[in-house]
Image (tube, rainbow, N blue to C red):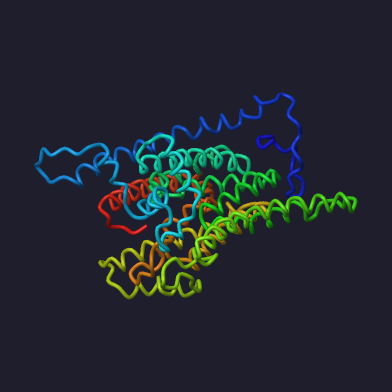
Amino acid sequence: MLAQEPSHKTNGVTNPPVNNPQGWRNTFAPWWKASRAVLPTFLLTRLLLLILTYFGGVLFNIPNNSSFALTPNTVLYSWYHWDAPRYLTVASQGYIDKSYIGFFPLYPTLVHIFSILSHFDTLLVGMLIANLSFFAALVVLYRLVEREFDHETAARSVLYISIFPTALLFFNAYNASTLLLLAVFCFYALRQGHWWMAGLAGMLAALTDFIGILLFIVFICEFLRQYIGQEKTPIQKKRTVVLLPLIAALLIPLGLKIYSDALTRKALEPFAFLHPQATASIFAPWTTLITLIKNVVGNSPYSFAGTHSLFELLLFILLLTTLILCITGPIRLTQDQWPFTVFGALILLYVLIFPNLPGGIQNQYDPIPALLSTTLELFVGVIILARLGKYPWFHTGYLIVALPMLAFFTFQLFTSHWII
């Protein structure tokens, strides 16, 4: 079963779990413990965002010195910006034109189903699904990091990802929370050798966002890690052991094929989601970086292009630094954790190759708009930051920087300024 603990590790290989004689109680006990551990952080950060919603939603939408009152629904619709309207349009009306096909179907389908069942507003349903998914993602992330490292690192990982400057997208009607949940669960299942559960999670991730297909590469990497160097087994047994996990891995591209087939039935190209707009959406990684750097040095630091590009460049450098720290330095990952680094590198490479948002077009003033949302899935970077958090100076510094930036981006969303 998924929650069973492996007996031990030998040469970086997780041995099969031992049957737990105490039954269901011990099976769910670690998950209940993880849920209780992450609940305070989850509730406090949701409370913070609700407070920002109240003050920002009211004071940014009514004139000064006025007794005019808004409705709670109007305040809630302060979040109805950026890509939230696109996800909700797909949920309520389907893919009404080609520009929407970059928004993969799983999350909008969930919103559609629960909107029909509950008769609630689609924005409210979308936000509820996003937040419930985020809570589940925090629980799985806590379990994963606790098993790989320790309780303190797990707790800091949960805190750091919850207050990351762009973590407001986990609160809004976006697919970011659902994708994070499926990606982390896929990792957790892979590390336990639960290949079919990992394949199913990866398939659902591929139906949530194109980035989910990267889990196929991670699946193969983790499979090779666990089986290279094992003692030789009889040929027939070895074939069985090798074959079944690889079949499970094929579930991940199957998710992409399901969506491609659906597009074909609508008389569209099977991979039309790679270029939903008429302009090019695939770039050489170095081209994207060069454009970003040119924007920083070639524009005034007091212009939108200069300031926005500077933030993106600093964020990219931060995430690249966490990947470097994965393989070198005192907090580097262990030899058997290298698939984490592979996934992080794939995320950064992906965002350089596909720098635009699904429904957006190339913008000369904003070279990598997808960076701010896509890198939320780079949980290995958060783990590295959490490992650095054992130093009080870093922990305090992260809180001082992250919390005000989270509030700033939230208010930018309310006023329709920033682009994510």
In which quadrant is the C terminus drawn? bottom left
The answer to whether 348 appears left or right of 337 in the picture is left
Across and down, in percent, residue 109 comes to: 47, 47
Task: Specify whether residue 324 is in view.
Answer: no
The answer to whether 27 appears left or right of 413 in the picture is right
The residue under the point 42% across, 65% down is 356
Q: Is residue 303 above or below residue 65?
A: below
- 173 or 264, nearer to the observer: 264
Q: Specify the quadrant of the image occupied by residue 218.
A: bottom right
Across and down, in percent, residue 377 comes to: 50, 52
Across and down, in percent, residue 230 comes to: 81, 51
The residue under the point 55% across, 33% down is 34
- 75 or 380, nearer to the observer: 75
How many numbered dots are placed on residues in this image?
0
In which quadrant is the N terminus drawn? top right
Q: Is residue 246 above or below residue 306?
A: above
Task: Specify whether residue 145 is in view.
Answer: yes
Across and down, in percent, residue 255 comes to: 59, 54
Q: Residue furthest right?
A: 234
The answer to whether 262 appears left or right of 393 in the picture is right
The residue under the point 51% across, 54% down is 378
The answer to whether 74 appears left or right of 329 in the picture is left
- 62 or 84, nearer to the observer: 84
